[in-house]
Image (cartoon, coloured by chain):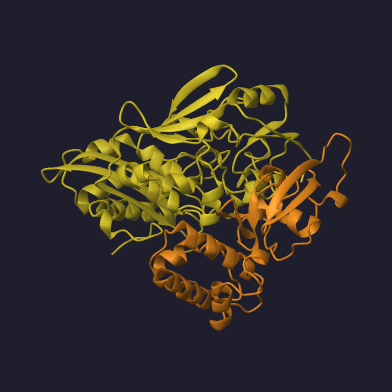
Amino acid sequence: MHNFNYTQVQTRSDAIAIADREPESKFIAGGTNLIDLMKYNITRTDMLVDINRIEDCHTIQETDEGGLSLGALVSNAATAYHPLTEQRYPLLSKAILAGASAQIRNMATNGGNLLQRTRCYYFYDANTPCNKREPGSGCSAIGGYNRIMAILGTSDACIAVYPSDMSVALAALDARVHVSGPEGARTIPFLDFHRLPGNTPHIDNCLAANELITSIELPANGFSNHYSYLKLRDRNSYAFALVSVATGLELEGGVIKNARIALGGVAHKPWRVLEAEDFLQNKEPVSENFLYAAEIMLKGARTFQFNAFKVELTKRAIVRNCIMALNPESQLPGAHPSA
Amino acid sequence: MLTDHPSSVQSGPAFRQQPVSLTINKKKYELNVLPWVSLLDALREHLDLTGTKKGCDHGQCGACTLICNGERILSCLTLAVMKNGSDVTTIEGIASDGELHPLQKAFIEHDAFQCGYCTPGQICSAIGMYQEGKAQTRAEVKELMSGNLCRCGANTNIIDAIMEVKEQMSHA
């Protein structure tokens, strides 16, 4: 591992000030992705700034608008099992618990989950070109083994997917990300937080230099009556999604009043298509309508040699998950398809 | 490859060793480590506590699982300096007064290992899982133990052993 110095801070302002002063610094919280990337020498730093002791990012609390604020330093496990999350945002609980392993969820923080980087094989393999790891070097995935890669929102520079499960639910729930930085504090709508690769795939999200995530805010509506998270992957557990779907539905008088569908494993960010959700409004919650919404969501999909199967898989996963959302009790541990 | 071991890296004057105080298996330890030394390497290379195993060293296998401040974590993805002041339990601290922990006995009874390399992590992970109290059914136990791989393929017996002790605990 590239050698570095280490310092621990007690406040956000100290964290930001040190990061501003040290050009090659990185913040560390859970470290489950960052330390791994440092072991592979994909991420290098001269100064690691440990933010775990910052006090005001460790709580989960209700907001004035009836929503929930998730401290950036609360662990993924503590967030998923928090009574307010379980009762009011079960979609988020399910998505978090579908990701990683119990040990990693104990370590990983909410802020860090949003900032985890792609698991594209070529990004991790320093012997191959990768525009995300080394801008301008080329993309090995486009002409390589691209089974796990994106089918939506890709560019000629990068077809990597963003791996977080938690973020798929946060996208469906219209969360907001609160950040602090050298220029002050700001709030970023979840769908604007992560970005598409375009010509700058080395930039995963819209955080400015030395900005810190301080909390994630959930609006009041948690879609807690009709929700489901479905994750399809090559192993039963502890694997990244080939395709995942988060669905939240509000039903009234036998029709859909409000629908949210977000996809994971198919793009460089959680994928939502508002046109598909609008289509479902005032429609019956039946497979035909969900399939039509799925067709809208997959419009413009571009496939590569080994991942064309993902288009049909994603459509079926959307339909299946929307049906599962009608009866959340039927869902199995691990976000597997239920009968 | 011990790139993170202090003796095998260039540690110029720019890099400062940091004092780390840990309580491990109820015993106090004081050590000085460079910032990039993992908790796993601190245990194995600095303190001769080699019960915790290094498998993949990338958070994929769970062999390095231990209990830190009451939670099961991966010691390979944890820097020792970040755990200053922590309370750690490793496989060496699971038995008490020479008496094996019920789960250790159950692993023997159920033949829950072949090579034994994943066993310390499996046992620490399962004890952490019991403490979390979130797994009731066998399916839930399997899901919440998925971070510990056994490449000998003893998983069925491992889950049998874990389930047996879980049931003993619920009747205790």
Q: Farthest residue toward the front?
A: B97
Q: Nearer the viewer, residue B105 or B137?
A: B105
Residue B140 coordinates in the image, percent (x, y): 41, 64
Residue B169 to residue A159: above or below: below
Residue A124 to residue A7: above or below: below
Residue appearing at x 39%, y 38% in the figure: A171
Occupied quadrant, residue A49: top right
Residue A41 coordinates in the image, percent (x, y): 73, 45
Q: Is residue A234 visible?
A: no
Residue A333 coordinates in the image, percent (x, y): 38, 60
Residue A49 to residue A232: above or below: above
Chain assigned yellow: A
On-image quarter of the C terminus of chain A: bottom left
Residue appearing at x 28%, y 42% in the figure: A223
Q: Nearer the viewer, residue B90 or A140?
A: B90
Residue appearing at x 75%, y 53% in the figure: B42
Q: Nearer the viewer, residue B57 or A302?
A: B57
Q: Farthest residue toward the top?
A: A183
Q: Is residue B111 visible?
A: yes
**What is chain B's hue in the picture?**
orange
